[in-house]
Amino acid sequence: MDKYDVVVIGGGPGGYVAAIRAAQLGLKTACVDEWLDPKGNPALGGVCLNVGCIPSKALLDSSHHYHRLQHEFADHGIHVKGASLDVARMMARKEKVCTTLTGGIAALFAKNKVTWLQGHGRLLGDGQIEVTPHAKANEPASVVEAGNIILATGSVPAEFSGAPFDGDRIVDSTGALNFSDVPKRLAVIGGGVIGLELGSVWNRLGAEVTVLIRRDQFLPAVDRQLADIALKELTAQGMNILLSSTPVSAKATKRNVSVLYEDNEGEKKLTVDRLLVSTGRRPNTRGLNAEEAGLEMDERGFIEVDQLCRTNLPGVYAIGDVVRGPMLAHKASEEGVAVAEHIAGEVAQVNYNTIPWVIYTWPEIAWVGKTSQQLRDSGADIKEGVFTFNANGRAHAMGDTAGMVKIVSDTSTDTILGVHIIGPNASELIAEAVVAMEFSASAEDLARTVHAHPTLSEAVHEAALAVDGRAIHR
């Protein structure tokens, strides 16, 4: 029986990062992963690199280029005739991006001497893990022993009982990443991050997109000012966003999908070519043998852990989507690093108060910390600074002036409590705010920091100045 200091189950952004960091720290490490690419070959990276973060961003970028070609290039004096869309080539590019990155992880495993055990991992107890190879390998199951086990099995799409996936007309996010053509009409159940991003992709490529949202509020987790701007901009781009619309059921035929939903006027019917069900994700503990091994989980299926990601089983940790907290790849990665360092005897922690969030629509939406509403509801005394991109020189030069930066700080100490951005490249701009909050910076600190001109980051600078009513260009 092979023995390891650390065995990680799951090769996504939490698992593979944990494995690499553990190996860097001198621990004999293995990673058990069962993911197969579309050709049936083992591939590291989990959902994120194979059917999540990376392929969706590849399609978002491709579709954004196409949208700009169709609607924005003329403003720059660029006129194009005879432009056409090649969906097959776009999808091939997306797959190449994925395989390049998943292959890169395999190379990193080899470099850091991480053993890749290709197959399904199952807890047996007492530090033992059964590894069942892929059927294609035609090999028997084996057992390995680990001094420490890290569970990083990720999450899977949550199902809606009224619209079961059929892989063709009614699909989950993976299916929506692999359409062979642009559907004339696409409905999306769920107005969260995944639904809006993939809805944006196909809307830009020419689909008539309708988004059904059960709540009466758009993006409730987002600062209200930003959410209002997002709703306005996405609607202007052609997305039909229906609030207070509760899906009831969906029935697929060979040609279309009939969707029944209820709004304030009663039951209504929507006929589309394809339906994307995007109602969130749930932790993936399938086949882990969790109950038999005595692993404690909560009522929603998340593995119970403490602040150091320790489970109730000695030497067993859990990270990422399978535990409490936001289902974000970078959160999983940081937990993986922290757990590996803790096992190696180092001091490690994850600051959950400074984890950034991003929605990759256009304009992009990004934030870190608390919203104004959350802080006021908690009784905090706050002050705010707002600066819009329509007063930013670089945004005008780019032709992307929609959106704003909002900084919220404590009235008495000026400590930054939240930063909220909607606008061009918000996903990149938010990093400055994360660093500032990690060092407990004040709005004054950002206001006194020199920002290059002309850049989009000047909007962050001006918002910091605006906290004390000192913005120059507003």
Image: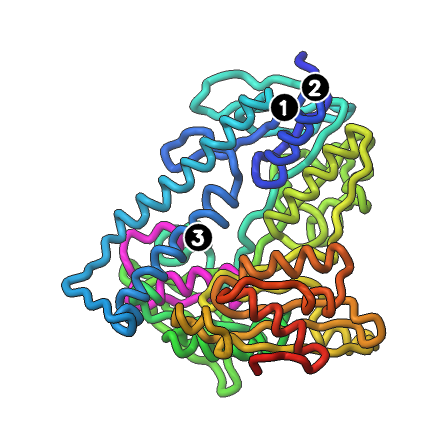
Q: Which residues are magenta?
A: 176-203
**Residue behind mark 1:** 30
Q: Quadrant of residue 226?
A: bottom right
For label 3, count other residues whose C-alpha is less than 10 Å away and answer few (under 14), some (14-19) or many (20+): many
Answer whether residue 183 is magenta in the image.
yes
Instruction: Tell me what residue is drawn at x 50 percent, y 65 percent.
Output: 455
Residue on which disc 3 sits: 56
Q: Residue furthest bottom?
A: 265
Q: Residue at x 47, y 68 (%)?
A: 363
Q: Picture coordinates of residue 112 (x, y %)?
A: 59, 23
C-alpha gap between disc 3 and disc 1:
29 Å
Observer-nearest of 144 and 64: 64
- SS at circle 3: helix
Residue 306 vs residue 458: left or right? right
- Amino acid carrying mark 1 in the image: Ala
The residues tagged by marks 2 and 1 sit, at their Cα atoms, a distance apart of 7 Å
| Amino acid type indicated by mark 3 | Ser
User: Which secondary structure, mark 2?
Assistant: strand
Query: As shown in the figure, which amino acid type bears the numbered disc 2?
Result: Tyr
Position of residue 119 measured from the top left corner of the image (x, y, whole percent):
54, 27
Asked if marks 3 and 1 touch (Cβ < 8 Å), the reply is no
Q: How many marks?
A: 3
Q: Residues within 10 Å of mark 1 (few under 14, many from 20)?
A: many
Q: Please, which colouring scheme is shown?
A: rainbow
* Element carrying mark 1: strand
Q: Position of residue 229 (x, y in %)?
A: 52, 78
Which image quarter: residue 146?
top right
| Quadrant position of the C terminus in the picture | bottom right
Residue lying at 72% horizontally and 69% vertically, measured from the top left: 443
Tag on residue 4?
2
